[in-house]
Amino acid sequence: MVLKKTGNNDLVIGRGLRDQFMFDDGYINLNHGSFGTYPKSVREVFRNAQDQAEARPDAYIRYTYPDLLDKSREAVASFLNAPTDTCVFIPNATTGINTVLRNLVYRPGDVIVYFATIYGACEKTVSYVTETTPAEACKIEYTYPHNHKILR
């Protein structure tokens, strides 16, 4: 899900941000997590960063990148109204799930609740945790609606 704050702090999500992306007309992106893209406004900044890294790789990796990373974390923290030192970036959702689930301390009676549509690698992490700690797992089974009219 993509979110955007408006001037009056209302959030715009989903379809309201479609024009911010480069999707073909008529394309409905249902899997932004696995095969997502970034907003148009990010593209120019992203490509500029690539150019800087190519022009002066050592200086970029040692000095520029850490500074940009800190500024990015500050921006996310501000958006989420959270302390900056609690905001981190991860390469993908699987890494995030692994990191969190493997670093919690589980006690008897703790249950990891997850949906049947979980990504396979994440379910393997749930299995690992329940095999090596007192935690239990609870998978929630459900089916998607079959009527495509709901999507429009």
Image (cartoon, rainbow, N blue to C red):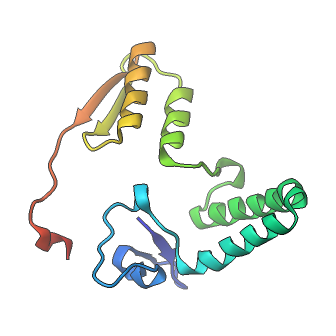
The residue drawn where x is 31% and y is 64% is 30
Residue 78 % position (x, y): 65, 65
User: 9 above or below 82?
Assistant: below
The answer to whether residue 114 is left or right of residue 72 is: left
Residue plotted at (40% across, 78% down): 23
Q: Is residue 50 above or below residue 140?
A: below
109 vs 54, nearest the viewer:
54
Please identify the quarter of the rendering in which residue 71 is found: bottom right
Outermost residue on the left side: it is 147
Estimate the x, y position of residue 90 in percent, counting from the top left.
60, 48
31 vs 1, nearest the viewer: 31
Residue 42 visible, this orientation: yes
Q: Please state, as top left, top right, bottom left or bottom right, where the N terminus lies in the image.
A: bottom left
Residue pictured at 39% horizontal, 15% vertical:
131
Q: From the viewer's perspective, is residue 135 above or below residue 144? A: above
Q: Position of residue 39 (x, y in %)?
A: 52, 75
